[in-house]
Image (cartoon, rainbow, N blue to C red):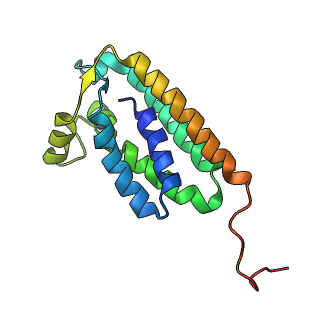
Amino acid sequence: MLVTNHVLSGALIGYATRRAPVAFTVGVASHLALDAVPHWGDDRAIEDVLHIAVPDGLLGATAMAVVTLTSAPQRRLRVLAGMAGAALLDMDKPSRLFFGFSPFPGVVDHVHQRVQRESAGRLPQEFVVGSVLMVVVAVCTRRRGMPGPPRPVGTASG
Ligand SMILES: [Zn+2]
């Protein structure tokens, strides 16, 4: 699955949870759950799919920055935590490419590899899912301009 889609899913998790550690943990779990759903993937070595992986990584990083910066301050940390958790397991790819090893214990890489339901023909599906996620995240982020919950009486500071 494209990391951008994991990032956007993580943003929604951040919006749906109340605490950053919970958002991060659910984000990590969501990565495995989404990788178990049929999605695009390619058995070729990462060096052979860089034409997809590099733009995806840059788009995912950009999405993470934009969503973080445009989220309401009271939501910002948990939204960032959700995105970071959701993207974390795919950090094995740039690590293998640049440093030659995965940063995770072997059991984590094994589980991550075993849940995959990939097909090289599902890239259009990734774009559809990503587009839908982008719209939903944009709607959630746009709510930042709405007034927050009412303050308890006596706490207003003039
Ligand atoms: Zn993955």
- Give how far across and how far down residue 136 sits, in percent: 57, 38
Where, by quadrant of the figure, is residue 32 drawn?
top left
Q: Of residues 149 and 11, which is closer to you in this image? A: 149
- Give how far across and how far down residue 118 sits, in percent: 26, 24
- Answer above or below: position of 152 versus 40: below
- Answer above or below: position of 44 versus 153: above
Which quarter of the rendered picture does the C terminus lie within? bottom right
Whether residue 122 is visible here, answered yes or no, is: yes
Does 106 sit left or right of 39 as displayed? left
- Answer above or below: position of 151 versus 78: below
Does 54 sit left or right of 72 as displayed? left
- Give how far across and how far down residue 133 sits, in percent: 51, 35
Q: Residue at x 48, y 23 (%)?
A: 128
Which quarter of the rendered picture does the N terminus lie within? top left
Q: Of residues 79 and 106, which is closer to you in this image? A: 79
Q: Of residues 63 and 120, which is closer to you in this image? A: 120
Where, by quadrant of the figure, is residue 73 drawn?
bottom right
- Judged from this view, the residue extending furthest toward the right is 158
Does 67 sit left or right of 95 as displayed? right
Whether residue 55 is visible here, answered yes or no, is: no
Does 113 sit left or right of 156 as displayed? left
Q: Residue at x 53, y 27 (%)?
A: 131
Count the labels in the image: 0
- Judged from this view, the residue extending furthest toward the bottom is 154
Where, by quadrant of the figure, is residue 156 drawn?
bottom right
Q: Of residues 143 and 81, which is closer to you in this image? A: 143
- Give how far across and how far down residue 3 sits, in percent: 40, 34
Q: Residue at x 45, y 33 (%)?
A: 4
Ligand 1 shows up in the quarter that is top left
Q: Residue at x 28, y 38 (%)?
A: 92
